[in-house]
Image: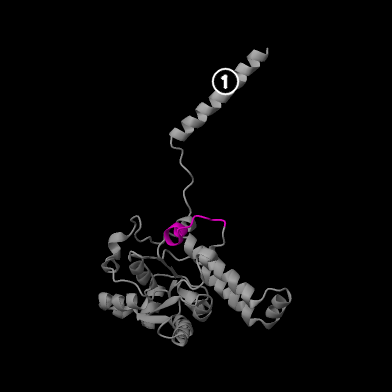
């Protein structure tokens, strides 16, 4: 009886060993690495995902933010930069402007600020949390690259705040004639909350207010931090404008930025919103 049990136990051990050997040799695939993990490998030579992202991605990293009024060339600028071999922008996140608006609301409300301070949720705590959230979204929603950028048009309504939490950030503000912008928005039925697409007057008034908000913050930030780019000039003189912009962003010239259409949909190329 004892010999029978020993034989059965030995048989089980051999069967398990053979199964493990087979699985190992059959090339069982590991789960794909996350964008965050791959960014760390590319930029920091680190694969320790247990550490806080901000330990790998410091606040003084020169992120690029593209903004402006919708239909002002923000997507064109984004895909042109996406074609650069050292840059990844990706599609709009949509959540970043909403979080920035929420953060601004907390700051404007005196009562809310008092309540937060009493709870120990100071500006420093909030800024750290917002910074960490933005980094997670920007790093995680696309392929890794040496320079990352974000394109959410209305995010630049919070340009001053973004430059505060990302002091080495660079901002690109797209500008276009308001009449052309509004006509494009209405004719293409681009829905923006609070805009009446049946009224050119309403849309132009709100366009003016939004552009003034972003442009004034761009000017206050200074030419070393924010660069306005006029859509009409970019279309008429793409190489001249892109050379100036890449110099501003401290990036080497890459002729691929003039041929972004060749990289659409290709691996490591340019992705478009679905």
Residue at numbered disc 1: 11
Q: Which residues are magenta?
A: 39-50
Q: Do we see residue 85 in this rendering?
A: yes
> Counting other residues with Cα less than 10 Å from the Cα at mark 1, is it few (<14), some (14-19), or many (20 or more)?
few
Q: Position of residue 208 (x, y in %)?
A: 45, 85
Q: Secondary structure at mark 1?
A: helix
Q: Position of residue 213 (x, y in %)?
A: 49, 84
Rendered view: 247 above or below 86 = below
Image side of residue 184 versus residue 134, left or right: left
Q: Do we see residue 69 in this rendering?
A: no
Residue drawn at the location 56% of the way across and 67% of the way down: 132
Image side of residue 80 versus residue 12, left or right: left
- Quadrant containing the C terminus is bottom left
Q: Position of residue 184 (x, y in %)?
A: 37, 74
Image side of residue 129 versus residue 169, left or right: right
Q: Nearer the viewer, residue 13 or 212?
A: 13
Residue with the most extreme right position = 118
């Amino acid at each position: 009886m004892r010999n029978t049990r020993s034989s059965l136990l030995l048989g089980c051990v051999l069967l398990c060993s053979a199964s493990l050997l087979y699985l190992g040799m059959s090339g069982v695939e590991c789960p794909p690495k996350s964008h965050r993990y791959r960014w760390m490998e590319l930029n920091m030579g680190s694969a320790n995902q247990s550490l806080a992202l901000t330990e790998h991605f410091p606040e003084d990293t020169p992120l690029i933010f593209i903004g402006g009024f919708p239909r002002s060339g923000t997507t064109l600028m984004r895909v042109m930069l996406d074609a650069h071999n050292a840059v990844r922008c990706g599609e709009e996140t949509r959540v970043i402007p909403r979080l920035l608006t929420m953060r601004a609301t907390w700051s404007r409300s005196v009562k809310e600020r008092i309540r937060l301070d009493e709870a120990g949720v100071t500006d420093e705590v909030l800024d750290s949390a917002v910074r960490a959230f933005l980094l997670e979204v920007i790093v995680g929603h696309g392929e890794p690259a040496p320079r990352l950028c974000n394109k959410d048009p209305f995010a630049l309504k919070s340009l001053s705040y973004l430059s505060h939490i990302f002091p080495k950030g660079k901002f690109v503000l797209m500008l276009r004639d308001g009449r052309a912008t509004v006509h494009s928005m209405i004719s293409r039925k681009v829905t923006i909350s609070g805009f009446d697409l049946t009224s050119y007057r309403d849309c132009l008034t709100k366009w003016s207010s939004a552009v003034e908000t972003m442009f004034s913050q761009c000017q206050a930030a200074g030419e070393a931090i924010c660069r306005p780019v006029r859509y009409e000039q970019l279309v008429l003189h793409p190489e001249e404008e892109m050379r100036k912009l890449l110099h501003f962003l401290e990036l080497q010239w890459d002729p691929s930025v003039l041929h972004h259409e060749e990289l659409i949909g290709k691996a490591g190329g340019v992705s478009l919103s679905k």
